[in-house]
Structures are given as structure tokens and as C-alpha cells.
Image: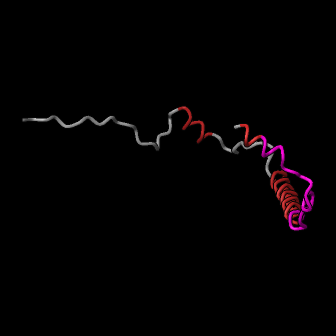
Amino acid sequence: MNALTIQILAQADPSGPEFGKASPFGLLVLLALFVGVVLLVRSMNKRLSRLPDKFEPEHPEADQEADEGTDRGAIPHTPQTPPDKTD
């Protein structure tokens, strides 16, 4: 900042006729946001309370086969080689 900008900002009087007055609309916006946050938190808490304590399947055998690489239903990966070029 140059010296002229600092001097102009220092001369600004923040105690004019409109200083410190806020519109009621700002208060309404803040209250609406607060109510929205409260409703979102309540909804999230309800959904979290419905979740089970653990996410373990009843029959993990199928998942264990897939994890161990012994899933017989999977298609084996075969690397593809480019065709030979004949000139």
C-alpha cells in the first residue's frame, strides 16, 4: 500500500449516521442457518443410531475366497500380445 491509501483509510470516520446499524434481515438469515444446522445434526444422529455396531457379513466365505484369489467365478486375466507384423 502506498502512503496516500493509508492516509485516506486513516481519515475514514467509522462513526457516521449508519455505523452500527444492522438490518433485521441479517438476523433472520443467521437464525435460518442455525435452525438448518440443528435439523441436519438431529437427522444425522438419528441415521447414525440406526447403523449396526459392526459391518461383518453373516457368511464371509464368499468374500474370503475373493480376497484369497480363489474365486472360481472370476475370469482369469490373460495378457494380450500384439499380432506379429509381417512386411
Q: Residue at x 78, y 46 (%)?
A: 8
Query: Residue 6 lies in what quarter of the image?
Result: top right
Instruction: Using the image as rendered, state which of residue 72 and residue 74 is in the foreground.
Output: 74
Q: How is the image coloured?
A: secondary structure
Residue 34 drawn at (x, y percent): 87, 58
- Can you say which quadrant of the picture contains the C terminus? top left
Instruction: Using the image as rendered, state which of residue 85 and residue 56 is in the foreground.
Output: 85
Residue 13 drawn at (x, y percent): 88, 51
Position of residue 41 in the picture relative to residue 5 (left or right): right
Q: Residue at x 81, y 54 (%)?
A: 44
Check if residue 22 falls in the magenta segment.
yes
Position of residue 12 in the picture relative to residue 83 (left or right): right
Query: Residue 77 lies in what quarter of the image?
Result: top left
**Residue at the farthest left position:** 87
Q: Residue at x 56, y 35 (%)?
A: 67
Number of numbered tags placed on the structure image: 0
Residue 76 drawn at (x, y percent): 40, 38
Q: Residue at x 84, y 57 (%)?
A: 37
Residue 27 drawn at (x, y percent): 90, 63
Instruction: Using the image as rendered, state which of residue 59 and residue 14 is in the foreground.
Output: 14
- Can you say which quadrant of the picture contains the N terminus? top right
Q: What is the magenta range?
A: 7-27
Check if residue 62 falls in the magenta segment.
no
Position of residue 52 in the picture relative to residue 60 (left or right): right
